[in-house]
Image (cartoon, helix red, strand yellow):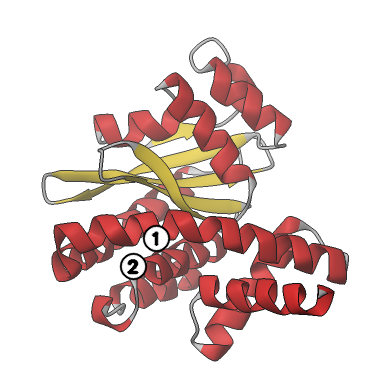
Amino acid sequence: MTRALDEAVQAVAGFLVADAPLGQTLDRVAAIAADAIEPASAAALTLLDDRNRPRTFVSTDDLAPRIDQAQYDQDTGPCLEAYRQNRTIRVDDCSSVVDTWPAFSQVAGEEGVKSTLSLPLVAGAKALGAFNLYARDSHAFSSQDESEAQLFSTQAAVVIANAGAYWGALDLADGLRTAMESRATIEQAKGILMASRHCSPDAAFRMLLNASQRSNVKVRDIARRIVSSNGEAQT
């Protein structure tokens, strides 16, 4: 295990679910994963909503929800197969799976993603969803990356399951809905940062994450402040 991954696993293992809302916990898990698994350009968590439908609740890059949504719309793809079959699925070349997962292959190509790694999030016997990594190079993930990502996804699943147990089934569903509702505000804030700082979507989201970590304030609250300040400036 690399030092970066060891520190990432320890960081996730040290999460106290009572200390932060579910949405903030998920944001931290995804951000740590993207940093720990070196070949990854982005990371995302697919979880089941209150209707048992897969949704991308957290991502470190805009490309992830679009690639995932293509799979949800067609009800097939590596992300879905990972949690349904409880196995890791590594796609070394997204263009090579066009016959198996055409929608996934097409959108991945449009987003510049050439390889992916999807791992099941399982706590006990319960499938929670999938942990997904995306890379801009083909054959980006090695067998070692796969093994290390499995360790991380196992710990992440425990944290998510513990959050569900702590907040209760109803609160968990509410928390997931809140996470989804917060995305619109976060996207607005990213747009404002992109326009004012002349930066990419990735850089804008990283600014939000860094501000959240520095101030110990939830990402969505940071985003709301930016959107509110921008609105006041325009009036």
Query: Can you identify the residue that label 2 sits on?
Result: 22
Percent of width and height locating residue 24: 42, 71
Point out the image quarter for the N terminus. Answer: bottom left
- Marks 2/1 in contact by CB < 8 Å: the verdict is yes
Figure quadrant of residue 137: top right
Residue with the mark numbered 1: 178
Can you say whether 200 is above or below 75 in the image? below
Q: Would residue 5 be seen by someone viewing this image from the given angle?
A: yes
User: Which residue is located at x 60 percent, y 63 percent?
Assistant: 186
The furthest residue to the top: 99
Most foreground residue, 223 or 105: 223
User: In the rendering, at what x and y percent does residue 29 appear?
Assistant: 42, 65
Q: Is residue 92 toward the left or the right of residue 233 in the image?
A: left
Residue 209, by quadrant, is bottom right
Q: Is residue 219 left or right of residue 172?
A: right
**Mark nearer the N terminus (2 vs 1):** 2
Crowding at mark 1 (Cα within 10 Å: few <14, some 14-19, many 20+): some
Q: Is residue 179 above or below residue 105?
A: below
Distance in Å between CA atoms under marks 2 and 1: 9 Å
Residue type beneath disc 2: Leu
- The structure residue drawn at horizontal position 88% and vertical position 65%, both measured from the top left corner, is 198
Q: Nearer the viewer, residue 140 or 116?
A: 116
Q: Nearer the viewer, residue 1 or 76?
A: 76
What residue appears at the point 24 percent right and 80 percent down from the top-left corner? 18
Query: Is residue 40 in view?
Result: no
Q: Residue furthest left?
A: 125
